[in-house]
């Protein structure tokens, strides 16, 4: 039962003759007669009584006509709704973002987006980057604004479009002996310290499921610190930085996060040599085989404009 067949029966019922219905439908009369015959044979029931005054509906025909009218109206309404979605008049997008990036990105992008698409609902899921990866793969999210994983943890089905890089810093108390051991480097925001110097230091770490921890583990592995002495594991980078500033241990955090969560304890910050690749990239993550609506594309374009530092670059 196709939409064409539904329209054929509906029009014949309303016009009461095959010839008038054929004219209205712009089809040949014999072709319409054959189509009606096939429909009735497939149903195993007559839909029309042939009378001198024209065609009248049988009981089965009345039921078919009623159903056809409803289905065609639903189909027409759906076409209108899809058209409105395509023209950004309505719709909904599902966006994933990390908690920290949410405070930075959404405050700048959402006002712009709602000016351009006032009737498009935005559903935001705030999770850590690892969880966002899984939600993209499961289809729960259209896309996510997050931090790309390291090479070893890239998801092959996800496209990571890099926006900008953010190097990590060593954070420790300003009274720590290593705080004054960094070497000045014009290309680094802070004095540079080789992380191998941290071999015997107590570490304040985030959980292994968090992207920051994955970057830290990678850096320490490159520094040949295979079993760091971890004295505390928690979820909040702000708390980790605060405790490091008070001398409880050392931690590593992204530069943007460090600047965002300055405290009255004034920790010491040290840059890490470039050879350790200590950093991550803010990115837009999408499913490689996924579909992005015009509203999705509009939101992503605004994120690029506000936060991209170069031409879009994708990681395979």
Image (tube, rainbow, N blue to C red):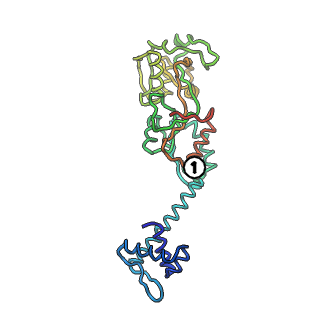
**Which quadrant holds residue 112?**
top right
Image quadrant where one finds the N terminus:
bottom left
Q: Across the whole image, how many numbered discs are drawn on residues?
A: 1
Q: Secondary structure at mark 1?
A: helix
- Front-most of 50 and 235? 50
* Residue 92 place in picture, x, y as percent: 53, 51
* Residue 82 place in picture, x, y as percent: 54, 57
**Which quadrant holds residue 310?**
top right
* Residue 249 place in picture, x, y as percent: 46, 17
Position of residue 234 in the picture relative to residue 272 (left or right)? left
User: Which residue is identified by label 1?
Assistant: 294
Position of residue 190 in the picture relative to residue 149 (left or right)? right
The residue shown at (52%, 22%) is: 278
Residue count near mark 1 (Cα–Cα under 10 Å), binned few <14, some 14–19, many ≥20 = some
As drawn, which residue projects farthest toward the left?
44
Look at the image and tell me whether residue 268 can be seen. no
**Which quadrant holds residue 309?**
top right
The residue shown at (59%, 39%) is: 303
* Residue 19 place in picture, x, y as percent: 52, 80
Q: Where 235 sits versus 56, above or below?
A: above
The residue shown at (61%, 38%) is: 304
As drawn, which residue projects farthest toward the bottom?
52
Look at the image and tell me whether residue 53 can be seen. yes
């Amino acid at each position: 039962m196709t939409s064409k067949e539904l329209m054929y029966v509906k029009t014949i019922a309303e016009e009461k003759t095959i010839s008038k219905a054929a004219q209205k439908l712009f089809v040949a009369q014999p072709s319409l007669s054959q189509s009606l015959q096939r429909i009735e044979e497939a149903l195993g029931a007559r839909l029309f009584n042939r009378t001198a005054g024209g065609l009248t509906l049988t009981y089965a025909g009345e039921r078919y006509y009623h159903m056809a009218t409803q289905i065609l109206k639903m189909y027409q309404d759906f076409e209108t709704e899809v058209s409105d979605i395509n023209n950004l008049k309505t719709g909904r997008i599902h966006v994933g973002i990390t908690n920290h990036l949410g405070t930075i990105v959404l405050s700048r992008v959402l006002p712009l987006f709602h000016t351009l698409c006032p009737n498009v609902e935005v559903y935001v899921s705030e999770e850590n980057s690892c969880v966002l990866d899984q939600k993209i793969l499961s289809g729960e999210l259209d896309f996510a604004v997050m931090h790309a994983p390291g090479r070893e943890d890239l998801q092959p089905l996800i496209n990571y479009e890099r926006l900008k890089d953010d190097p990590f810093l060593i954070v420790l108390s300003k009274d720590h002996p290593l705080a004054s051991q960094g070497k000045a480097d014009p290309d680094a925001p802070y004095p540079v310290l080789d992380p191998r110097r941290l071999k015997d230091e107590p570490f304040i770490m985030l959980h292994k499921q968090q992207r920051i921890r994955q970057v830290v583990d990678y850096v320490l592995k490159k520094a040949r610190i295979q079993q760091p002495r971890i004295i505390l594991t928690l979820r909040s980078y702000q708390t980790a930085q605060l405790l490091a500033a008070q001398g409880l241990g050392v931690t590593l955090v992204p530069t943007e996060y460090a600047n965002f969560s300055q405290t009255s304890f004034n920790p010491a910050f040290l840059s890490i040599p470039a050879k350790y690749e200590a950093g991550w990239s803010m990115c837009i993550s999408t499913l490689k085989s996924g579909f992005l609506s015009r509203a999705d594309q509009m939101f992503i374009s605004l994120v690029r404009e506000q936060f991209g530092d170069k031409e879009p670059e994708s990681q395979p």
